[in-house]
Image: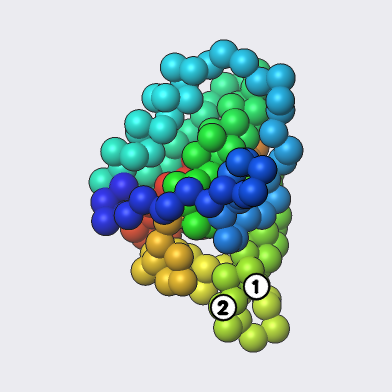
Amino acid sequence: MSGVQPVAAMTRVDGARKPPPVWGNVPPRNRAFTGREQLLEDLHRRLQEGTTAVLPEALQGMGGVGKSQLAVEYVYRHQHEYQVIWWIASEQPQQIRQMLVELARRLGLEVGSGEANTAVPAVIEALRVGEPYKNWLLVFDNAEDPDAVREFFPPTAQDAFS
C-alpha cells in the first residue's frame, strides 16, 4: 500500500485488540478457525504490496469452501493495521449501495439526506483522498467477481477484496 502509514495497535485493558474507529458489519470471528496460514500470509503480503491504483484481492472459488471465513479471520488478525474496516454484503448492487450509505454516516460525511446517489460517490472520494481516514479495508463479501463491484472501488483504492 503506497503512502499508508501503520496504525498503532489499540489494546483494551484485558489485552485484546480493539476494532478500528470505524468498524462495520464484520461477522463474528470463528474461534475454531484453524489452518490456512499460508493463504492468510499470501493475502496479507498481496494487500501490503499493493502499489497499483486498485488492488482487488479476490478469494474466489465454489460456494461453501470457506472464503468468507478466511476473510473474517484476516480482518480480525489485521484489524490493528486499519482505521476503517467495512464488511459489505455484495450479492446485489443495491445492498452495496446501502452499506456505503451507512459507511458515509459513520465517516461523518455531509451527504444530505443520505441517499445512495450522493453518499456512494462521497464515500468513494473520501477513501480515495484518505479523509478522514487513510488506512482502510473494504470487504465485498459474496461478490460474483471483482468486476461486479469495481464501480464501488475508489480510483486509487488501497485495499479491497471480495
Residue ID for mark 2? 109
Task: Kindly state the secondary structure of the residue where label 1 is placed.
Answer: helix
Q: Work out how far the residue at label 2 is from the one at label 1, CA to CA, in angstroms.
A: 6 Å
Which sits in the foreground, 16 or 19?
16
* Amino acid bearing label 2: Leu
Name the residue rendered at 39%, 25% in the picture.
42
Count the marks: how many?
2
- The answer to the question of whether label 2 and label 1 lie on touching residues, with beta carbons closer than 8 A, is yes
**Rendering colour mode:** rainbow
Q: Is 108 drawn above or below residue 52 in the view shown?
A: below
Give the left or right position of residue 43, taking residue 89 as reference: left
Q: Quadrant of residue 70?
A: top right
Q: For mark 2, does the 10 Å Cα neighbourhood hold few (<14), some (14 to 19), or many (20 or more) residues?
A: some
* Viewer can see residue 90: no
Give the x, y percent position of residue 157.
Answer: 39, 54
* Amino acid bearing label 1: Arg
Which sits in the foreground, 65 or 16?
16
Q: Residue furthest front?
A: 13
Give the x, y percent position of residue 89.
Answer: 68, 47
Task: Kindly state the secondary structure of the residue where label 2 is placed.
Answer: loop
Give the x, y percent position of residue 78.
Answer: 50, 39
Q: In the rendered structure, find residue 161 and report the number of the disc placed on it.
A: none
Residue ID for mark 1? 105
Q: Residue furthest bottom?
A: 112
Give the x, y percent position of residue 133.
Answer: 45, 65
Q: Quadrant of residue 112?
A: bottom right
Q: Is 108 drawn above or below residue 31 in the view shown?
A: below
